[in-house]
Amino acid sequence: MLNQLPLKSKPLESLKPLFESGTVTLANLEIPLTDTKAGTPYKSAAEIKARTQYILKADPKFAPQIKAVGIDLVSLGNNHAMDYRADGLNQMIQALTQQGILYTGAGPTLSEAKEIVSKANVGLVSALAFMNTSAINKLTPARDDRPGIHALFFNGTVTDKAKAYLKDWISGQRGKNEIVVVALHWGIERMTTPTPYQVALARACIDAGADVVWGHHPHVLQGAEVYKGKPILYSMGNLISKKEGPTGLARIYFEDGQFKKFRFLPCQISGGRAKPTPEKQSKPRLEAFKRLSQAISRKYKSKFAQPLY
């Protein structure tokens, strides 16, 4: 989390060569860039003291650093985008916009939070996809008349109604984009295997027209699969965290709008930030990610799915 590090530390600088080597680079920005004071009323002081809820923010001056390392599109459809209410969201949007960083997943209205953003024919849409509706309501979901986060209210079940919503949201916004990435904030923290709801929802997103499903929130790696020829990354862990440990980046190759290849790029979190794992040490990390992906294949068998590593 950016709030744990000073501006002068430039926490993303070590990843700049990897970010800049891709055609388009996407990131989950899970912290409001704001200096406003009033926190959300939906996370109580008791919850924060008990560490069952967290309120986060970071200096808006991090926005130029995000741009400088080569990040193009950011997902705001997460459980912290509204930690400092509408004022905090608006300040973050302004900071990102000033740097030319495109965002989605939260906004002044629901329709704006749902909108696709794109660069080089790659489009991104984003949503908070927690199973529990009461948990979602604590995080200020957007409405037609209220700023907030784009949230999927599916109550842990992907019904026909949910599938229709996904198709309208994903396919309806494709436009001229050859590739549509769906970012979903979901799952259980510290769990290295996705839940049945994650798997059902991810596969439904592919059926609804997504070319990639990209997950975050568990703060650990969860492995990946190819479903009907399209990649699903259930959780890519952290990039900036006070907890040291392995993580990684995903590099996805497309040709003429079709998925061709996936590479997992091992990284190590140390001193609050991620750095590429030296080549000599990367093999165990690659094998660990392979095992995570194979575990998904064994637990959630489908003739349309294969492990991705």
Image (tube, grey):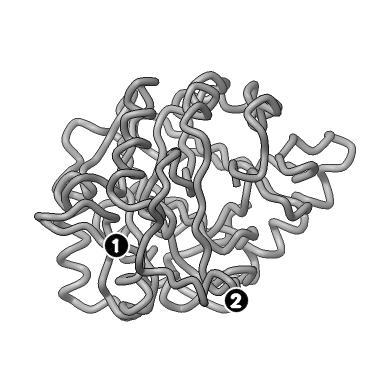
In the image, residue 138 above or below residue 18: below
Tell me where residue 20 appears, x and y as whole percent: 56, 21
Viewer-proximal residue, 263 or 4?
4
Name the residue tied to disc 2.
50
Q: Is residue 136 left or right of residue 11?
A: left
Viewer-proximal residue, 170 or 143?
143
Q: CA distance from mark 2 to mark 1?
A: 21 Å
Name the residue rendered at 16%, 55% in the picture.
Answer: 146
Name the residue tied to disc 1.
140
Viewer-proximal residue, 129 or 90?
90
**Type of the residue with mark 2:** Ala
SS type, badge 1: loop
SS type, badge 2: helix
Q: Quadrant of residue 40?
A: bottom left
Tell me where residue 186 appears, x and y as whole percent: 45, 65
Name the residue rendered at 45%, 39% in the picture.
Answer: 35
